[in-house]
Image: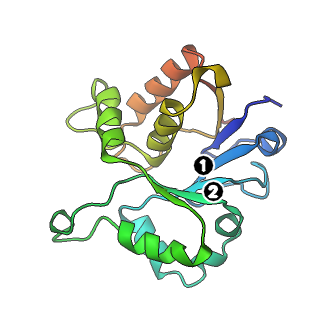
Amino acid sequence: MSGSRLAIVGNAPGIEAAAAVDAAPSVVRFNNAAGFRGRTGSRVTHLALVNRGGQMREWLADPGFLDRPVVRAAEAFILPFPMLPAEHNRPEQVCWTREALALLAPLGKPVHVLPEDLHREGGLRLGAGTMGRPNPSTGFLVTLALLLGRPSWSGPVDAYGFGFAGWPGHPWAAERAWFAEAEASGQLRLHPSR
């Protein structure tokens, strides 16, 4: 076990980290939380839910979403994208922040929406390795927010299950490079998938 006070658990397949993850006092998971209650353990203190695009639209249409085990087990939620003004959310709705807040409200748990400043910072950090304006992933944004808000004396964060693959609109190579830099600087320990 790593002994980290914080474990961040991505959704890449092939990780076996249940004991190490469950030993961490704080555990952040993402979206559908692959491996939850199995190969990646059963703890979750914060569940980050992508609040833009089709995935949140699907969850909003799912009458059983709030009954999912990982949603019930989470102590708090993180929405990685700030709320778009209504005039910027047309002609096709992409931002579901208002609806996500309403959906989660009956649970009575805190919901943290990451600020626009974090997105600008993330874009600057990823910009050198991408073409045009980078569109960071939920995993990158939440990890960046956690590292920026964490005192350096608290030790590295353990990151499990980051495969740097998925939706083709994210700058995966730039994110992989950023994680490698964070590991080299001692901010996190990246546990690769098998």
| First in sequence: mark 2 vs mark 1 | 1
Residue found farthest to the bottom = 63
* Element class at badge 2: loop
Q: In terms of image quadrants, where is residue 100?
A: bottom left
Q: Is residue 128 shown above or below 133?
A: above
Tag 2: amino acid = Ala
The x, y position of residue 101, in whole percent, is 45, 70
Give the position of the C terminus as an image quadrant: top right
Residue at x 49% of width, y 43% of height: 142
Binning the other alpha carbons within 10 Å of mark 2 as few (below 14), some (14 to 19) or many (20 upward) gives: many
User: Horizontal placement of 106 versus 141: left or right?
Assistant: right
Left or right of 124 on screen, residue 154? right
Q: Amino acid at mark 1?
A: Asn
Tell me what residue is drawn at x 53 percent, y 72 percent.
Answer: 104
- What label sits on residue 11 in the rendered view? 1
Q: Is residue 164 visible?
A: no
Q: Nearer the viewer, residue 136 or 7?
A: 7
Hey, which quadrant is residue 158 in on the image?
top right
Q: Is residue 177 visible?
A: yes
Residue 175 tag number: none
Q: Is residue 89 above or below residue 6?
A: below
* Up/down of 73 relative to 107, above or below: above
Residue at left offset 47%, top offset 35%: 144
Q: Which residue is mark 2?
A: 33
For marks 2 and 1, give the CA distance: 6 Å
Residue 152 drawn at (x, y percent) = 58, 21
Where does the image place residue 191, in percent across and percent down from the top left?
67, 30
Element at badge 1? loop
Image marks 2 and 1: residues in contact by CB distance under 8 Å: yes
Q: Residue at x 63, y 56 (%)?
A: 33
Say few, some or many: other residues with alpha carbon within 10 Å of mark 1 (under 14 / 14 to 19 / 20 or more).
Answer: many
